Every structure is written in structure tokens, then in C-alpha cells.
Image: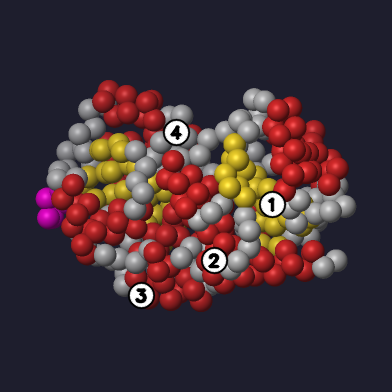
Amino acid sequence: MSTFVMNYAKAFVKFGTSVDVLVNGFIEQDFNDLLVELGINVYNFGNRNRQPLKYLRKLRELIRKEEYDIVYVQGNSATLAIEAFAVNPFRNQLKVAMHAHGVTTSHPFINSLLKQYFLNHFDIALAASQAAGEFLFDGRSFDVVKNGINVDEFGYSNINRENVRNALKLAPNQKLIVQLGALTPQKNYPFTLDIAESFLNDNSTYFALFGDGPEYNQISQEIANRQLTNIGLFKPVKDVSAVLSAADGVIFPSQFEPFGLVALEAQSVGTMLAVSNVFVRELDITPAISYLDLNVQAWHEWIDDLSVGNRYDSALTQKLIVEAQFDMDTNATKLLHVFESYLLK
């Protein structure tokens, strides 16, 4: 969701729309710096789940002060009713857009409790995928807003490949497998450790994991306990495209996944990638992607079949992504038209 917000905020500013961003408690410094550089105001009222009353009060004060046309809220469940309740006193002067990103929630009881209020207190229903919209909006109509990327920012670079591989001290014939994403239960990093362990006696394959999150220390300790010398655990990188260029394969063995934006970026670079079967089929855009069951042997065999340096031409994969209408400019323009149509009602 953070990357989605960043991509669309940049595009909106590019098209002359004024944007403010409200953060739920935490924002990575790189994201914050980029938003400020774009002239976007960044507000942070603390964690909405831990301090809901403070969050509600501050949000209402902000809306009263700034007189927004659209309040655009991202989330996975009917806990978005918190924002709906905060905005409700201003419904006669603005439109409320709710955007569904997930197909499950870690708060099922609260989701059920708040669902009816949520469904009656917004104007615009949007979703990252058909499945996400069906999950959140309970049969009500919604528009799918594709998770676009700037394909020009995600092309293959041989220089980037060499720089990253040299930094990792890889041999020329050593296969690099990469996983990028938050270290959370959803991303299923313990499964990745199982895959890496199956290659432990095979010095031809190295795994580089890039991410941060609540499971970082746990995963780091597990790597040490299991003496997985063929894995490196790294903090998130700013230049994702460079890492994707360096990789011979990218893996996303998520236990559940609303979309998977980095999987789209990997395809743009032309890197071979494998995703778990829970990923939406809308991502099946180029021949670079494979869907696999969460079975270690299946992933081992997929990696075993990869060759060092073998990839698809990024010019071809980018063309397919644009044709599938996942490019950022097209989708941002469409979304702005949706907003404008509601403002004219």
C-alpha cells in the first residue's frame, strides 16, 4: 500500500493535482524525503490503532483546515470505518474514496462489527483487484484501479547487475535468488529459509533477502541457528531495479497477497520470478512469471532450472505491461477522471 500511495502521489503531482499524505504511525525516511521533495505535505498523527481518539481528532482538524475535495483512504478491512467516521461531518463538502487492497484481514471480528457502518459512509469504492473489491464491498459496485508502475524506472541494467553482484561478492557463475518485502508472517520468509536450506550443500546458489519488519530479528536468528551460510539478510534498498537486474530469480512465497507490486516490477526488468498460487492472476502478464504451490521441492526445482544471466528482454516485458494497462501514467489519468466525475455529481 505504501508503494501504491507513493506511485500515485507522484503521478497526481505530475498532472497538477495538489496532494497531502497522512501516515499511519510510520514512514520510511526515503519515502518521506521524496514526498517532501515533490512538495507534498506529510502528516503523522501516530498509530491510529493505538491512539484512535487522537487520530480522529487530528484528522478532523486537518480536513476542516485544508478543505479537501477528496479524502482517499487505503486499507484491507472495514476498520476503514475509523476514517469514514472522522470524515462524516464534512460529507457535504467533499467525497470519500475507499480503496480495498487485500483479500483477507487479521481483524475478522472487528471487520464484521464495523462492516455495515463502513458500507454506508463512503462515496467512491475502489479496489486493487477484483478479488479485493469483492472481499471488502460485499456485492456493491466498485472500480478496479490497477497497481501501475513507471516502466521506464524498471528496465534491465548490466551495470547495475555487475555492481550489486560485486557488492555481494558473488562468483560469475553463482546464481542469485532474491526476495524483497516486509518481514511479516504474510511474506512467508521461514519458507524461504527452507528453500535455501535445500541448497545449502550447493555453493552455486546464493539467497539475498531485502526487507525490514517485525520478524527481522527472528529471521536473522533463525539463519544463524540453522547455519545458512548461503543467505544474506539486508535492510530495504532504495534502488529496487538494480537488485532485480542482479537477480537470476526472484521469489514471492507469500501466504496471502492482495497484489504484489514488486512482482510487477520484476517482470518489467525481465527477471524470472516465482510467486505462490495465492497471488492474483492479474499479475500473469509476461512469460517471466511462474505460479507455484507452497511446496519446497517445487521451488527448489524451479530455481534449479534457472541459468545465471538468463532473462527476458525488458523491452518486451515492458511492452506487455503497458498493453495490460499497468503503466502508471495511464492508471493515474483514469483515476483522476473517476474522481472528477464524482466531484461533478
Q: Which residue shows up at 48% across the image and 44% down it?
A: 32
Residue 173 falls inside the magenta stretch = yes
The numbered dot on residue 174 is none
Give whichever of discs 3 and 4 has the lower sequence position. 4
Mark toward the viewer: 2 or 3: 2
Q: What is the three-letter code of the residue carrying label 4?
A: Gly
Which residue was labeled with disc 3?
A: 315
Residue 306, image x and y in percent?
26, 58
Residue 121, image x and y in percent?
83, 47
Instruction: Give residue 288's quadrant in the image.
Output: bottom left
Residue 310, image x and y in percent?
24, 65
Q: From which residue to which does the magenta span run?
A: 170-175
Question: How crowded is the residue under tag 1: few (<14 C-alpha within 10 Å), some, or many (20+)?
Answer: some
Q: What is the three-letter code of the residue carrying label 1?
A: Tyr
Dominant secondary structure of the residues highlighted in magenta in the image: loop
Give whichever of discs 3 and 1 has the lower sequence position. 1
- Decide: is 52 above or below 1: above
Give whichever of discs 1 and 2 has the lower sequence position. 2
Q: CA distance from mark 1 to mark 2?
A: 18 Å
Mark toward the viewer: 1 or 2: 2
Residue 308, image x and y in percent?
20, 59
Which residue was labeled with disc 2?
A: 14
Question: How crowded is the residue under tag 3: few (<14 C-alpha within 10 Å), some, or many (20+)?
Answer: some
Instruction: Give residue 79's quadrant in the image.
Output: top right
Mark toward the viewer: 4 or 2: 2
Q: CA distance from mark 4 to mark 2?
A: 31 Å
Mark toward the viewer: 3 or 1: 1
